[in-house]
Image (cartoon, grey):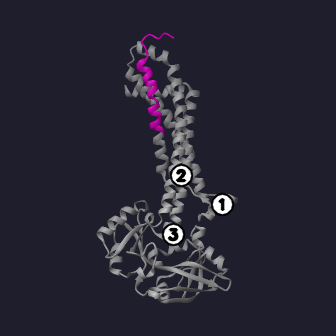
Amino acid sequence: MKRLAVVLAWRNVSRNKRRSGIAAAAVAFAVFFSVTLRSLQLGVYGHMITTVVGGVLGYVEVQQEGYWPLQNMDQSMPEDLEWLSRVRAHEEVAKAAPRLSGFTWISSTQGGSVAQLVGADWEAEGIAEWNKRLVSGSLSPEPNGIWLGEGLAKMLRVKLHDTVVALSQGYQGALANDVFPVAGILVFGNPELDKRIAVVSLPEAQSFFGAYGQWTGVVLTPKNPTKHKRMAQEVSKSLPKKGAVWQTWEERMPELDQAIEADSTGGIVVLFVLYVVIGFGLLGTMIMMAEERRREFSIQIALGVKRKLLALIVVLEAAFLALLGSLAGGGIARLLVEYMHRHPLRLQGELAHAIEEQGWAPVLPPSMDPAIAWTHIGIILALTLALSLWPVRVIYTSPTVYRG
């Protein structure tokens, strides 16, 4: 009986091509726009998080208690290489890199600016990752070298092999000053960040600030970035460090987390409205299908066809229409997302300028997560199957003798 229901349902779908085409097109439209819009939205969030969090801030940072939010270098932690090696060996941790950073006045013959001087361990953080950010120069060892953000280099009007002067207050009130040759220019994808960051090697930063044997924090990168909170909890319990606090990026940048959450909620509301509109369109198609076939249902019931079998056929018809539309819409959306991933949309004019003023590059890279497409296909399938209850109701209320 089930095989017969599948065969009859497929024949009914192809019997009225116009009606089936309208229903499948409505489903395809809904899946196409929902997948495309959500991929763009989540892709922009991912770009924001990768730029600020993955690039500089870190998904999780271990700091001495009292260091954040003032970022006072006097609240730095002493080096602990034994503990660091055990953290790196943890199954949830991909990388663990110590840093020493402080605010510094950097000047050239053309001007000056306040910037955050970050002392990074190139080997621990991954030379390949830093090389991706290089616009010019190299990370090859250079005595007393400094790597400037692209925006900062433009503000100071310096280029490779020029020299800059750095002046700051060091560890426990020491006077920090030195002359650095520009060894490279870095870009982080965040215009505001590019104007406010300079990088040196970790030993060079310790020497400059007079903070020998000190770290301001240890940046942890999880193997699965989406599970960084779980990693922080597990590592902090299994490898505790006295006087240290474990902070996720959401705790250090709550404004970014709240902005993403608020914008995501708005996107969900838009998708909800889209599904409501498409849902009423599908409901109209279901009502039309049921009313056109009342006589057919009554004759079949009079001939001995069970209502249960007829209901199953109708539900399978709706499932076939939803599946065909979902695969068509999802496939086209995936091709478009793939194209936009290789050629990201770049905003122009006043809108691009407004985005840059907020600190983000004016580019819209989509998310490539396949779960987005499958999630919305599943929603459409569930919605269509729920709406198929209308013709099922008609079947169970149709009389044996049709009078119309």
Find numbered disc 3 in the image and state the secondary structure of the residue it sits on: helix
Q: Residue at x 33, y 80 (%)?
A: 82
The disc, 1 or 2, on the residue closer to the chain's N-terminal end is 2
Majority secondary structure of the magenta segment?
helix
Relative side of 355 to 124, left or right: right
Cα distance in 3D space between marks 1 and 3: 22 Å
Residue type highlighted by circle 2: Ser
Where is residue 27, by image quadrant? top right
Measured along the vertical axis of the image, is residue 370 above or below residue 288? below
Mark 3 or 2 closer to N-term?
A: 2
Give above or below for 240 relative to 260. below
The span shown in magenta is 380-404
Mark 3: few/some/many CA within 10 Å (<14, 14-19, 20+): some
Residue 137, image x and y in percent?
A: 60, 79
Residue 161 percent location from the top left of the image: 63, 85
Q: Is residue 140 left or right of residue 230?
A: right
Labelled disc at residue 352: 1
- What is the three-letter code of the residue carrying label 3? Gly
Label 3, label 2: how far apart the Cα atoms are: 22 Å
Provide the residue designation for mark 3. 55
> Which residue is disc 2 drawn over?
39
Whichever of callouts 1 and 3 sits on the residue coming sooner in the sequence is 3
Q: Nearer the viewer, residue 204 or 122?
A: 204
Q: Quadrant of the N terminus?
A: top left
Q: Is residue 223 magenta?
A: no
- From the viewer's side, name the closer residue of 96 and 59: 59
Q: Residue furthest left?
A: 238
271 is higher (above) or lower (below) than 190: above
Q: Secondary structure at mark 1?
A: helix
Foreground residue, 10 or 146?
Answer: 146
